[in-house]
């Protein structure tokens, strides 16, 4: 869950390595405040 917590905060780091993974997780986990209630 730690990774999801900082999804946007550390997105740049993960995106640089695998942009495909980041994109696939976008629909799975909402961003910002939407992510909290959904979680």
Image (cartoon, rainbow, N blue to C red):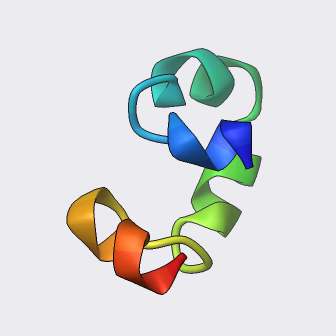
Residue 16 appears in which quarter of the rendering? top right
Q: Looking at the picture, how far across and down is residue 15, in whole percent?
A: 60, 29
- Determine whether, in the image, residue 32 is placed left or right of residue 11: left
Is the residue 38 above or below the residue 21 in the image? below
Residue depicted at 35% across the width and 62% down the height:
31
Q: Looking at the image, which is closer to me, 10 or 16?
A: 10
Is the residue 26 above or below the residue 18 in the image? below
Q: How many marks?
A: 0
Residue depicted at 54% across the width and 71% down the height:
29
- Determine whether, in the image, residue 20 is placed left or right of residue 32: right
Q: Looking at the image, which is closer to me, 20 or 2?
A: 2
Is the residue 4 above or below the residue 35 in the image? above
Q: Looking at the picture, how far across and down is residue 18, in whole percent?
A: 76, 33
Q: Looking at the image, which is closer to me, 9 or 18?
A: 9
Q: Quadrant of the C terminus?
A: bottom right
Q: Looking at the picture, how far across and down is residue 12, in whole percent?
A: 48, 21
Tell which residue pokes out farthest to the left in this image. 33
Residue depicted at 59% across the width and 15% down the height:
13
Q: Looking at the picture, how far across and down is residue 8, in whole percent?
A: 40, 38
Is the residue 12 above or below the residue 32 in the image? above
Tell which residue pokes out farthest to the bottom in this image. 38
- Determine whether, in the image, residue 39 is placed left or right of residue 8: right
């Amino acid at each position: 869950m730690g990774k999801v917590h900082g999804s946007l905060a550390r997105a740049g780091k993960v995106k640089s390595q695998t942009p495909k993974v980041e994109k696939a997780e976008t629909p799975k986990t909402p961003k910002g405040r939407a992510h909290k209630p959904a979680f």
